[in-house]
Image: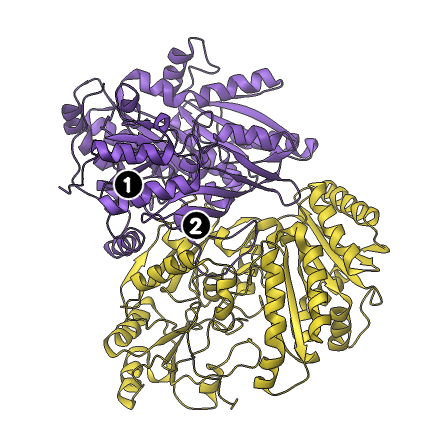
Chain colours: A purple, B yellow
């Protein structure tokens, strides 16, 4: 196993000089927070956490790392689901939480310039106030930060129409592991001056450089949206209905599938009945646009397509309150599932037409391995979150029991031309599975890029690439 | 200056064994074609050109290059404007023109899988037949190939609404300089398994790997579109009107500006009067969508915005023939300008709101340096093609005269937060200017990536990075 230089009291002092003593955390219980994210119940141990405010401070921390050989794990809000922010080798956690300024909303150019610690929802609301829209909206949008969204190329329920984080990043400022800073461009819709370094950083999970500023594309905010919920008596029928919507050539702004076990978890979590809770599966559709009549017509058409495809019933949200009620079910599923039992989430994605086959395969695997599973997700994108559950509180036992089932689920996904992660990232939780969907040559190319950015391997070690990492520690 | 191993008769024989004798070109005049593209009048000398049909043949050619130290210059249709396909150091030109199969149009997943030699328009028409749309459409769409489009991250007049080539590349198959092949993913809308290698290859100008297959995203084809042309009595007023359209929050599918000198060139080229030919500037607008009424209403609204912003007059194309007439003017401008005089094209792009300032700056430079210039382009994207002209047939004299003016134009663009190339690429024609818009750290990062992919520097040498290259040869 790789080892790194330790954080000594002298290092803590130097960090205090860089960011101010108040922004260096080196004692529990505060420090423990920086050793976990939302990935299962994994807890690691940061030696120290620092909260820089400026790019220059990030540079100084990275120069210290480069000089001393202490690893740095960058961190947003810690809402990640693949362990990208976990300090698996200890060292310094660099949290961008204080770099949370919206530097500019440029209405003339439809651009926002932000620091990485800006919360997704804060940005959405700020741009919404001037009639603009930043579409990527992961379930954690109320707390997750733009820097983390960029690191993981975050998605969300509106990506089916609007695309991913990568589609909104025009340019970045970033700090290399050696402390050098660079920019990838400006407020430009078109710029082919050299390689797309910004796009390379998107989704690189904080392993190549630390993003210190982002220039994001905005779009005019759709003036109208409407939501519809359809109930099905089988998951198969629902999954096939998704394909029928695709073929209708209407592009909903949301197209989600939820199976019964997830609805039950939602009811339990919300403490109230959810609509169509006895259905075997539901499809949630949102249509948006600038023209009210077109939105209504498209939604009606999607409703017809779903009914023709075998829906038992469908309801339109005819008030904002009803709309919020329907959305709240979908939004709570991550939290709700977490309450049911310890789980491991397989973030599968397949070509959208293969969703029915994926869901059948998942149920086959669950039956074969005797595990429970709860599936839901962004069916319109082919991205299904399969949560495999266990009642065992013991991590090792859980791992022994679930790992073969997880591998079988990933085998189903990749046999359908799919991936092991549609939007959560590889981090340390999925790195051993990456080779299931990337060939050895692609893996070598990625490693070559990593080495070019980070020759000493000090930035977010133990992530993306399979590595022997220490076991998690007990929670504080 | 870097030197490379020569192509010997034995190498030619080995290439003939790989791709068949009919697909190895080693004599003029056929060979001369592979030594030029559409960049000014630059002509270089390939030692041999090969036309593989399969990925395996591309691999074999690259292994030969890797073994012998002979450089390889990949080539699409040779329609590039920055010299990306020019074999500046001789060696092998690898043309993908025979790799021209549309492998699959997957209507259920809205995806096309193509070989790199498929012509853009051929793909557009094939997907159009089943109601789908592939938006990137460079002016050369009738001849340019998807492989070249990917290499240059090609744009076109519809990018203002629909984005660039990068926004449609889901995944790629590519061959490394050493002959190894890899895939970056599948038919997936969402896939965050490791670095975005596909996005890194887009716009890398054939300097990192040779794309041998592309999986492209398609969208439903808009059912309706309408075109409007507006006339202005000054370029300033027209440029400000573009900003007003942006602020209206309507997103036209095309938003182009053309100045008078370009209209005159078009009239000369087409041999017929063009509409509003006495206007100092024109704006061409297209609005598209799925709802005829919305399209009409949005177009009318854009028309009102343009009139409020000072347009002298505006005309709607009310028949397909009229629409084609308006479009034909815009589409011929590259060819038309080329006929006026030898020229160098500055592919500037700035934040859209800075277009008026850019155009004023360009005219200031033209006056100061005593040069003629013709400007037009994708104003909605902030991407203006500034063609600086000279009557001198002598390349060196031309260069002496025009270079200071080009540098001054790029200085204007970059001072406005712009770039030296919005959609044409760097190639060898712009490599000396790249440092004007990319900082030294970004340049080092790019070079590190290049070295990781191509440690021997045999793939498309002399491109993107500033290098001493041989002078062009006389045309055959």
Report the residue marked by disc 1: A460
| Secondary structure state at the residue bearing disc 2 | helix
Q: CA distance from mark 1 to mark 2?
A: 19 Å
Residue A199: mark = 2
Residue B29: mark = none
Instruction: Pick the residue in front: A11 or A281.
Output: A11
Q: Residue at x 62, y 67 (%)?
A: B408
Residue B221 in view, yes or no: no
- Would residue B25 be found to the left or right of residue B14 on screen? right
Instruction: Pick the residue in front: A20 or B270.
Output: A20
Q: Chain of mark 1?
A: A
- Would residue A359 be found to the left or right of residue B261 on screen? left
Marks 1, 2 in one chain: yes
Q: Report x, y in % for residue B281.
A: 78, 62
Q: Quadrant of the N terminus of chain B?
A: bottom left
Label 2 CA crowd tier, 10 Å (few <14, some 14–19, many 20+): many
Q: Residue at x 73, y 63 (%)?
A: B258
Q: Report x, y in % for residue B265.
A: 74, 74
Q: Measured along the vertical axis of the image, is residue B252 above or below residue A306? A: below
Q: Report x, y in % for residue A337.
A: 34, 20
Q: Quadrant of residue B264?
A: bottom right
Q: Measured along the vertical axis of the image, is residue A322 above or below residue A290? A: above
Q: Quadrant of residue A239?
A: top left
Q: Quadrant of residue B4?
A: bottom left
Residue A160 in view, yes or no: yes
Q: In terms of sequence position, does the residue under pointer 1 or pointer 2 come before the other?
A: 2
């Amino acid at each position: 196993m790789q080892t790194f230089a330790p954080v000594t009291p002298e290092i803590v002092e130097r960090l205090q000089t860089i960011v101010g003593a108040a922004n260096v955390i080196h004692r529990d219980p505060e420090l423990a927070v920086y050793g976990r994210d939302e990935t299962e119940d994994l807890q690691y141990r940061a030696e120290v956490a620092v909260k820089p405010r400026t790019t220059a401070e990030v540079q100084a921390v990275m120069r210290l790392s480069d000089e001393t050989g202490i690893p740095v794990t960058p961190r947003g809000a810690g809402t990640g689901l693949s362990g990208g922010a976990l300090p698996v080798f200890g060292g310094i956690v660099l949290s961008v939480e204080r770099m949370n300024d919206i530097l500019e909303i440029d209405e003339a150019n439809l651009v926002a310039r932000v620091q990485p610690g800006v919360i997704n929802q804060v940005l959405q609301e700020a741009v919404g106030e001037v009639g603009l829209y930043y579409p990527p909206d992961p379930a954690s949008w109320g707390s997750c930060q733009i820097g983390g969204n960029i690191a993981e190329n975050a998605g969300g329920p509106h990506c089916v129409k609007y695309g991913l984080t990568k589609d909104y990043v025009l340019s970045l400022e970033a700090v290399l592991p050696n402390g050098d800073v660079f920019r990838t461009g400006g407020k430009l819709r078109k710029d082919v001056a050299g390689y797309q370094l910004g796009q390379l950083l998107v989704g690189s999970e904080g392993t190549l450089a630390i993003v210190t500023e982002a220039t994001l594309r905005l779009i005019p905010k759709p003036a109208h949206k409407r939501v519809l919920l359809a109930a099905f008596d089988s998951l198969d029928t629902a999954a096939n209905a998704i394909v029928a919507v695709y073929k209708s050539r209407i592009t909903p702004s949301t197209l989600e599938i939820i199976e019964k076990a997830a609805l039950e978890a939602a009811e339990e979590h919300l403490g109230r009945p959810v609509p169509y809770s006895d259905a075997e599966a539901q499809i949630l559709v949102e249509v948006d646009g600038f023209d009210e009549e077109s939105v209504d017509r498209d939604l009606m058409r999607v409703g017809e397509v779903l009914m023709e495809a075998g829906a038992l019933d469908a309801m339109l949200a005819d008030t904002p309150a009803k709309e919020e009620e329907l959305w709240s079910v979908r939004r709570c599923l991550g939290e709700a599932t977490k309450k049911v039992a310890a789980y491991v989430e397989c973030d599968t994605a397949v070509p959208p037409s293969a969703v029915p086959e994926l869901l059948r395969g998942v149920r086959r695997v669950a039956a074969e391995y005797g595990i429970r599973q709860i599936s839901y997700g962004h069916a319109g994108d082919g991205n299904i979150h399969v949560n495999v559950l266990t009642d065992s509180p013991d991590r090792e036992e859980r791992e022994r029991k679930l790992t073969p089932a997880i591998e079988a689920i990933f085998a189903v996904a990749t046999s359908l031309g799919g991936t092991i992660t549609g939007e959560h990232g590889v981090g340390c939780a999925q790195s051993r599975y990456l080779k299931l969907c990337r060939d050895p040559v692609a893996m070598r190319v990625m490693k070559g890029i990593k080495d070019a950015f980070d020759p000493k391997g000090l930035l977010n070690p133990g992530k993306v690439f399979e590595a022997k990492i220490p076991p998690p520690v007990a929670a504080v």
